[in-house]
Amino acid sequence: MKTNSKLTLPALVLVAALAGCATDPAGRPDAVPSLGGLFGSGLSPALESQRTRLKQALSGTPVVIEATEDRRLRVEVPSRFSFDPGRAAVKPALGAVLDQLAVGFKPQAATTELRVGVPAGADASPRLVQERGASTRDYLIGRGVPVSRIVDVGRAEGGALEIVVSDRP
């Protein structure tokens, strides 16, 4: 029997069986990701819609838009497009990304939350990182993102501004 699927029926049965009896190291079966992550992004429909729209709108730019393993939407903007050295004002390139994010965030405002991580490069003192975070937060609020949905503004580990959107618990 031929199938158009990349996985054969016996392979799908095996994957489903293994997923059904899997547990995390602490023995909690509910902490294991669903099969949705194997066949798609694993995001909720609202976040998947946002991811698809952002990928289309920001195609051809260096902005990274991806689903994370813990079912969040992650948007990463290289720092050189986010802020000028030593300045906290949002650059136009970052503004364009935030505008796109705000457009899609408003409809899901009641079901999602947003976290902003600001890079702390060589030019960024703790105060500048804080000011950049506030500038990014204020920009999003100015575009209609409810302040109650911006749950964290802090420091990013990498060299890029990172925005993570997740479903509210």
Image (cartoon, helix red, strand yellow):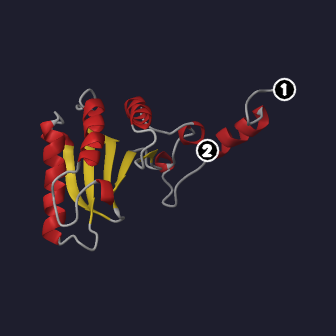
| Quadrant of the rendering where the N terminus is positioned | top right
The number of numbered badges drawn on the structure is: 2
Numbered label attached to residue 2: 1
Q: Residue furthest right?
A: 1
Question: Residue shown at 25%/52% (left/top)?
Answer: 116
Q: What secondary structure is found at the residue carrying circle 1?
A: loop
- C-alpha separation, residue under disc 2 versus residue under disc 1: 25 Å
The kind of residue tagged 2 is Ala
| Quadrant of the rendering where the C terminus is positioned | top left
Numbered label attached to residue 104: none
Numbered label attached to residue 19: 2
Residue 58 is left or right of residue 40, and the answer is left
Residue 104: which quarter of the image? top left
The kind of residue tagged 1 is Lys
Frontmost residue, 119 versus 110:
119
Question: Residue shown at 45%/45% (left/top)?
Answer: 66
Residue 39: which quarter of the image? top right
Residue mark closest to the camera, 2 vs 1: 1
Circles 2 and 1, Cβ within 8 Å, touching? The answer is: no
Question: Residue shown at 32%/43% (left/top)?
Answer: 165
> Of label 2 and label 1, which has the lower sequence position?
1
Frontmost residue, 126 versus 5:
126
Residue 104 is left or right of residue 89, and the answer is right
Frontmost residue, 90 versus 1:
90
Is residue 168 something that shows in the picture?
Answer: no
Q: Is residue 78 above or below residue 7?
A: below
Is residue 118 something that shows in the picture?
Answer: yes
Residue 7 is left or right of residue 107, and the answer is right
